[in-house]
């Protein structure tokens, strides 16, 4: 279906605008993906938006034309509107000229297959959606089976997380769970839980990693709770030669992820 | 000196507010540092703000009292104001209860001492101040001599970069230079220039790193210009097992930085 929207007060505009807000995303089960590059990444792996919203007066673009055709062929909706209305939807002065609306997917632990990969990333109380997206992007690079978000984390379907993931939100499975759910799930099968830690830890380059290896990083300001660290099979430490005692959470996950990738026994 | 500001239209409020803007920071040579934690990090290594701005009605805090006394003793100014005015200055609804104003420092290449460290981080056209701050933080951790910003980069004195650096802006030297200045400076002394690259590259874990090793990462969306890569002494590649062909710039710098730290011949 194709239609045009010219009024700011159109209910669809109001709905799309509401998707910038986590509460409304949870209620509707949909999220926004901004920009042709991300939408093309999604399309290339067979993920199409339910709705495509394009600004009038955009340059013709072969990729956009194909995307439009694919969305129509799949029974989706293509909406044309003004650049101003698109800016209102995305909340950006210089909105990308196209935005897609996708259905969120199942993010329960039960949807993961732990034998699918030797490396998994696990983040606890990760607050920054940029860090979350960066971890997804790193997960894609190291071939991680997925990113597991423990306790209250940023929303993987927020615009900032999607953007920082550079499309990895579509390729790297995400699960969300409380620690009380995660630990029994982990212990019900194979899996080595490894924490980046300052306490009672072995040097990260001398550690014995075993697949499937679950790399756990903690909250940006508090780090991991002590009992979470204690529940790990292995605590590793990275050199900290300066004044600080920790790395950015996404950086810690990446340095460990690449180390595990090089050293894990499969 | 100590004074109280109660009016939104006070010229000092206007001045402080202007420091959120890069253009005004460059003109005045000053920048803002928000929050007691960062200010205390700075104080602990002997860096004091010229001006300390505190919200009234804050909780008494021993660290803040000491900071206040140190700023006064050093001839600085302590300003008390309302939470609303402080929010107006920082542009945040929930402003930290204290903000400091520091003089910017010399960021010319000439201020660096290349023999000071075996590792240096170099970023080209880095646009994201969060990435910049994260690279400073990583630089602190791997004992880097400094971060060299090539071409048009984000401002290391922006609030976002300072915050992401977690105080490393005070401990890790920063230099800003055009490529045309940087390359002759580098070649005028010892130094191995290493790029994270996809072209004609050796695996990053098998490469021969030599101190002082300058790790160069490119712009977030374009990567490094071809001729910059060609000018490097060594091009290394990291495994990319997924669909993406690059890592976040700050992540790439960290993974390489830790590899060089482990393997560099000094």
Image: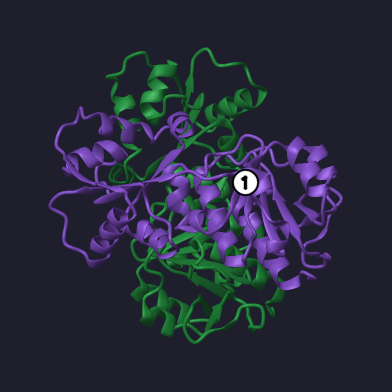
Chain colours: A green, B purple
Q: Which residue lies furthest to the bottom in this view?
A: A200
Q: Is residue A172 visible?
A: no
- In the rendered image, residue A112, in percent from the top left (x then y), is placed at 51, 65
- In the rendered image, residue A44, in percent from the top left (x then y), is placed at 64, 40
- In the rendered image, residue B5, in percent from the top left (x then y), is placed at 17, 38
Mark 1, residues whose alpha carbon is within 10 Å: few (<14), some, or many (≥20)?
many
Foreground pick, A27 / B215: B215
Mark 1 element type: strand
Residue occupied by mark 1? B175
Q: Quadrant of the C terminus of chain A?
A: bottom right
Left or right, B95 with reference to B27: left
Identified at 67% across, 23% down, the residue is: A62
Identified at 81% across, 64% down, the residue is: B210
Query: Vertically, is A59 above or below A34?
Result: above
Query: Vertically, is B250 above or below A108?
Result: above
Foreground pick, A42 / B233: B233
Left or right, B10 with reference to A250: left
Q: Residue A88 appears in which quarter of the rendering?
A: top left
Identified at 66% across, 83% down, the residue is: A206
- In the rendered image, residue A216, in percent from the top left (x then y), is placed at 49, 71
């Amino acid at each position: 279906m194709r239609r045009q929207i010219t009024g700011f007060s159109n209910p669809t505009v109001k709905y799309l605008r509401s998707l910038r807000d986590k509460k409304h995303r949870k209620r509707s089960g949909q999220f926004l993906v901004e920009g042709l590059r991300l939408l093309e990444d999604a399309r290339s792996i067979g993920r199409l938006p339910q709705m495509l919203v394009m600004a009038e007066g955009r340059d013709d673009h072969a990729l956009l034309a194909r995307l439009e055709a694919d969305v129509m062929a799949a029974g989706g909706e293509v909406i044309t509107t003004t650049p101003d209305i698109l800016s209102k939807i995305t909340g950006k002065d210089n909105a990308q000229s196209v935005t897609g609306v996708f259905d969120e997917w199942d993010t329960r632990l039960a949807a993961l297959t732990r034998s699918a990969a030797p490396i998994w990333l696990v983040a606890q109380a990760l607050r920054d959606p940029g860090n979350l997206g960066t971890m997804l992007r790193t997960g894609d690079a190291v071939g991680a089976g997925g990113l597991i978000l423990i306790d209250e984390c940023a929303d993987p379907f927020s615009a900032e997380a999607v953007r920082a993931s550079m499309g990895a939100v579509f390729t790297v499975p995400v699960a969300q769970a409380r620690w009380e759910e995660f630990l029994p799930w982990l212990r019900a099968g194979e899996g080595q839980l490894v924490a980046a830690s300052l306490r009672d830890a072995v040097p990260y380059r001398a550690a014995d990693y075993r697949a499937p290896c679950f790399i756990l990083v903690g909250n940006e300001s508090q780090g991991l709770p002590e009992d979470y660290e204690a529940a790990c099979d292995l605590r590793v430490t990275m050199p900290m030669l300066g004044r600080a005692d920790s790395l950015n959470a996404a950086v810690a996950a990446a340095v460990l992820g690449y180390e595990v990738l090089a050293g894990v026994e499969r």
